[in-house]
Image: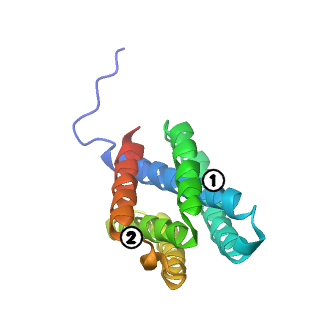
């Protein structure tokens, strides 16, 4: 017997939760790649040891987030983004390029990325309030971490970067585009 197609709206909640997990997994993966790119540059210079240490600490936090989303992807049967190979190169490249521009530019990159992610997580948290308490708790906890990374970047001089407004705007635009793409693809 032939199965009829799903009715409109059927499975919408599960699809939306899957999109949230997929995009959050992709975002944490991308963040790890950005920090790896920055560390690849700063780790080569003794004079950049402080920046390398801060970036390694933030990367470790993002790696923990990624492991959580790895688990959720497996437990809930969510397909990861097909864009991962592109996000790997783009993230590492963005991290390395901003680090080559200097410590303040690397921190401006962190501030821009974390600002977009913090707002993204805030929207997800509101949407998850009555839908998925476990995922909401994870998103809320990670949002706090991202705000900490953003604040660290600001304290390290992110906004003193020459061309800060343009650099920040371009990075934020790229992040928002990556979010939209990773939700679906």
SS of the residue under disc 2: helix
Answer with the quarter of the image where residue 5 lies: top left
Residue position for label 1: 71
- For the C terminus, the quadrant is top left
Say whether residue 72 is visible.
no
Q: Which mark is residue 15?
A: none
Query: x, y (%) of residue 26?
Result: 51, 50
Residue position for label 2: 164
Vertical placement of residue 138 versus 3, above or below: below
- Between residues 16 and 45, which one lies in front from this camera angle? 45
Q: Which one is in front in this view, the residue at disc 2 or the one at disc 1?
A: 2
Q: Is residue 49 left or right of residue 98?
A: right
| Separation (CA) of disc 2 from disc 1 | 36 Å
Query: x, y (%) of residue 13?
Result: 34, 50
Who comes first in sequence, dot 2 or dot 1?
1
Callout 1 crowding tier (Cα within 10 Å): few <14, some 14–19, many ≥20:
few
**Residue at x 52%, y 53% (from the top left corner):** 94
Q: Is residue 61 left or right of residue 79?
A: right
Query: x, y (%) of residue 164?
Result: 39, 70
Query: x, y (%) of residue 47?
Result: 73, 74
Q: Is residue 101 left or right of residue 129?
A: right
**Residue at x 37%, y 41% (from the top left corner):** 184
Q: Is residue 17 left or right of residue 79?
A: left
């Amino acid at each position: 017997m032939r199965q009829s197609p799903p009715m409109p709206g059927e499975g919408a909640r599960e699809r939306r939760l899957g999109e949230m997990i997929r995009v959050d997994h992709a975002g944490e993966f991308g963040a790890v790649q950005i920090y790896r790119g920055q560390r690849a540059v700063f780790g080569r210079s003794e004079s950049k040891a402080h920046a390398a240490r801060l970036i390694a600490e933030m990367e470790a936090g993002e790696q923990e987030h990624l492991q959580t989303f790895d688990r959720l992807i497996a437990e809930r049967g969510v397909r990861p983004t097909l864009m991962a190979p592109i996000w790997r190169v783009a993230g590492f490249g963005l991290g390395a390029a901003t680090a080559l521009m200097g410590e303040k530019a690397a921190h401006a990159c962190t501030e821009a990325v974390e600002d977009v992610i913090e707002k993204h997580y805030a929207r997800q948290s509101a949407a998850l309030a009555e839908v998925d308490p476990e995922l909401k708790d994870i998103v809320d906890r990670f949002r706090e971490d991202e705000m900490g990374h953003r604040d660290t970047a600001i304290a390290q001089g992110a906004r003193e970067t020459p061309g800060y407004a343009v650099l920040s705007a371009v990075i934020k635009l790229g992040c928002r585009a990556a979010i939209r793409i990773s939700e679906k693809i």
